[in-house]
Image (cartoon, rainbow, N blue to C red):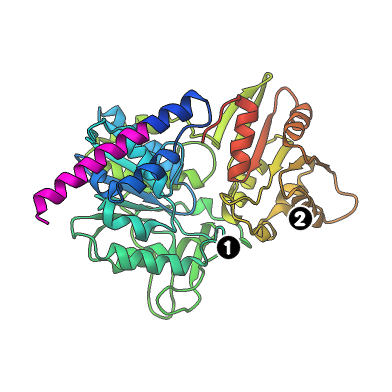
Amino acid sequence: MDVGKIQFIDRLRLGFAVSVAKSVTFIVQFLRLGAASVLPGAIARRIQPRLLELLSQQVKNGVILIAGTNGKTTTALLLCTILERKGYRIAHNSTGANLENGLMSALLESTNLLGTLDVDYAILEVDENIVPRVLTPLQPRIILCLNLFRDQLDRYGEVDTISKRWTKVISTLPAETVVIPNADDPTLSNLGQQLPQRVLFFGLNEPEHYLEAIPHAVDSIYCPRCGHSLDYKGVYLSHLGDFTCPKCGFAKSKATLESSEWSQILVGLYNKYNTLAAATAAIELGVDQATIRDSINNFQAAFGRAEDLVINGKRVRILLSKNPVGTNETIRVVTESTDKTTLLVLNDRTPDGTDVSWIWDVDTEKLVERGGTLVVSGDRVYDLALRLRYSEKSLQSKLNLIVEEDLRQAIATALEHTPENETLHILPTYSAMLEVREILTGRKIL
């Protein structure tokens, strides 16, 4: 079959796939069954298996892929905000649906009935486990590698396995591909140093923010090259910090931007990393620093990521907490505040990972020691309650622990215990976060 006929058939199937996908989107949204962020892509993909490739080829200025364990949604939204302020049209999986069907649904949303995609950039946050499968069809212009932490071990395995797969596939991409890894993550710093493409790094250079000690949830404190223990001057979170290997000389890469010269979006030191990642990519794309800084100063949180709501006259802050490192950081945000009421929600559904043993790697002792009221709920509420009880140093603890199986009632109870002048912090896993927001706002996200 000649090339022209193949291209004609591809275009015909693409147009049909788009028409069906848009019909599905309309029905799902009309019936208020969700945001239609996954199903349209799943159906369209069955009609046109090359959907992702054919759509990404039409993005005028290229695809920007954002991968990592934590921070993808916030970093993607910030970069999207920066580019939109410059007048660019963006395709973006804003609901956080970051598997293949979600990526396709995001691109389909900006595609007309003829299968033509008219956008300047596609900013796609991608689940770290599917990066090797989507890099070839997407052919991204920029790849942002945020971090690699243990997350959903029942699905992914250890971080070094993921890193090796990333390195193998990224190294086959065109030389003009720009890769932006986190210099403070030994695994990703090493990845960037091994690649043939153009590599820019982002990271912190602010020793005043070092943790007092390496946390229990640390992952990669060994040299990714020789396996020897790394020497750390200090860590910022988990294994992210300033390191060298005394045996082979491997060391942290130099960051492109001086972190102390940049303010950060939202609360929590982890959001400084998200800020620097987005800023480094935006500068590489030619955006002026004034626009970037103004976007940072006026940034609004993505759903569930340090998102602030007002419910019944009381302020509520939702801090997604889905793995040991992320939860330790959200606990740090809570303990640095003067607020004394916290709701923790632990689910074990597919989006969360069915293995919840990770809660024993979380430094819940810091949360318990400060006292106050902790309300717990979710599918694994008793596992969580047990973990918190084991965190108490004595039976005379000042902790008021409330166990409530029903999430709606748990939220109501937590709000009742929150004084008018304080903030209720809610720390949910992913599926729990979606439930919490639906209860609080009356709207589904997915």
Residue visible at 38% across and 67% down in the picture: 165
Name above or below for residue 123 compared with residue 173. above
Q: Are marks 1 and 2 in contact (CB under 8 Å)?
A: no
Start-end of magenta stretch: 1-22
Name above or below for residue 344 compared with residue 440. below
Residue visible at 32% across and 37% down in the picture: 108
Residue sticking out furthest to the front: 1
Q: Quadrant of residue 110?
A: top left
Q: Amino acid at mark 2?
A: Arg
- Picture coordinates of residue 190, whole percent (x, y): 37, 67
From the viewer's side, name the closer residue of 31 and 280: 31
Q: Amino acid at mark 1?
A: Asp
Name above or below for residue 121 compared with residue 416. below
Residue visible at 56% across and 58% down in the picture: 152
Determine if the magenta segment contains residue 94: no
The answer to whether residue 346 is left or right of residue 122 is right
The residue identified by callout 1 is 154
At label 1, counting other C-alpha atoms closer than 10 Å, the crowd grade (few under 14, some 14-19, many 20 or more) is few
- Picture coordinates of residue 273, whole percent (x, y): 44, 48
From the viewer's side, name the closer residue of 159 and 363: 159
Q: Earlier in the sequence, mark 1 or mark 2?
A: 1
The answer to whether residue 100 is left or right of residue 8 is right
The answer to whether residue 81 shows anywhere in this view is: yes
- Picture coordinates of residue 109, whole percent (x, y): 34, 33
Q: Quadrant of the N terminus?
A: bottom left
Is label 1 or label 2 in front?
1
The answer to whether residue 360 is left or right of residue 202 is right
Determine if the magenta segment contains residue 7: yes
Number of the label disc, if any, that sits on residue 387:
2
- SS at mark 1? loop
